[in-house]
Image: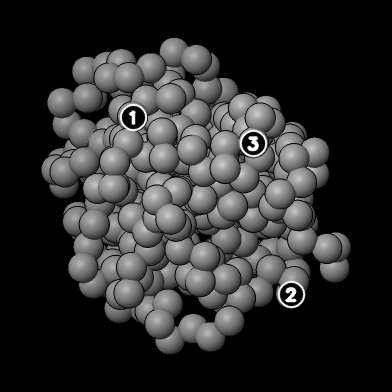
Amino acid sequence: MPEPVNLQDRDRVIECLDRAAELLRQSAHRRGCCAHLPAEGRLLVTGDLHDNPAHLQKIIHAARLDQGDDRHVILQEMIHGERLINGLDLSHRMLIRAAELVTRYPRQVHPVLANHELSQMTGRGVSKGAGNSVELFNDGLEYAFSQDWFDVAEAIGRFIAAMPLALRTERGVFCAHSLPGESAMRAFDPDILERELTAEDYERDTGSAYLMVWGRRQPASLINELAERWGVSLFCLGHQHTESGIEAIAPNALILNSDHQAGRVLSVDLSDPPDIETAVLGAMPLSAISA
């Protein structure tokens, strides 16, 4: 197994991020802005991580990626945690580790675009309660890389821009950070999944990628409409907080959190995915997983 990337080596970090971006764009699973998985193997679905490295380690252990290239894992919202280190947000380290995993398991590790990564890429302020997370993240980069921090920030932006908007499986499981809210549907392009993302898709309040990763409180009628249009049997989403780590929000949609003490993950048999009740009951507490 290759040595981990030195998180203070500017050249190696940029090389890793750019290689991961290239692999995401060239993946055999990639069609349009989505990753597509066949009806074989297993998928470990995770929710928001928000710079929880201990939970990332447990997730990678539970995914058992070394047991075959039909084992997959989704990663989302890895940056901008609430826990600062001497006032610094050093969550760029988790993003680099995710890129490193993509380079090691290029057909198996699937980071999907989330609103905090989008905010960091575009420089639009967002907060987890400790201040402007984008500025705190940049301060952490400057602390780690001194005058070279902006070069690393640009490489991070290229990695984020290469992330798929969603992951879809042959048997109808759809994993994304969120879905557009009801009021956003007037501006949202439901055909976005069939094409590559453009700069306009990232625009605040009007871009379809922006509207999707920022969407909240979708009524069951909207979720059912999108399920019918996109051929979805089960939506697995993040973005919204749930105390129990998993929550059904519609007959065919659930929210997962993987960042807090009650965080959970869901293991999906790609040949026989669960219904909503089985998924909620079968989600694994991260506290029960040893790494």
Residue 93 located left or right of residue 68: left
Kind of element beneath mark 2: helix
Q: Position of residue 61 (x, y in %)?
A: 61, 76
Q: Locate the N terminus and report the quarter of the image it occupies.
A: bottom right
Above or below, 51 against 132 in this view is below
Q: Earlier in the sequence, mark 1 or mark 2?
A: 2
Q: CA distance from mark 2 to mark 3?
A: 40 Å
Residue 143 position by quadrant: top right
Is there a contact, CB below 8 Å, between mark 1 and mark 3? no
**Disc number placed over residue 125 in the picture, else none:** 1
Q: Nearer the viewer, residue 121 or 101?
A: 121
What amino acid does circle 2 point to? Gln
What amino acid does circle 1 point to? Gly
Residue 241 located left or right of residue 207: left
Q: Position of residue 147 (x, y in %)?
A: 66, 30
Q: Position of residue 172 (x, y in %)?
A: 45, 52
Question: Residue at point 54% right, 75% down?
Answer: 58
Residue 219 located left or right of residue 98: left
What amino acid does circle 3 point to? Ser
Question: Residue at point 32% right, 36% down?
Answer: 132
Q: Nearer the viewer, residue 251 or 112?
A: 112
Residue 82 in view, yes or no: yes
Query: Residue under circle 3?
Result: 146
Q: CA distance from mark 1 to mark 2?
A: 40 Å
Query: Residue under circle 2?
Result: 67
Residue 275 in view, yes or no: no
Q: Tell me if mark 1 has few (under 14), some (14-19) or many (20+) residues whose alpha carbon lies within 10 angstroms of its own.
A: few
Residue 185 located left or right of residue 164: left
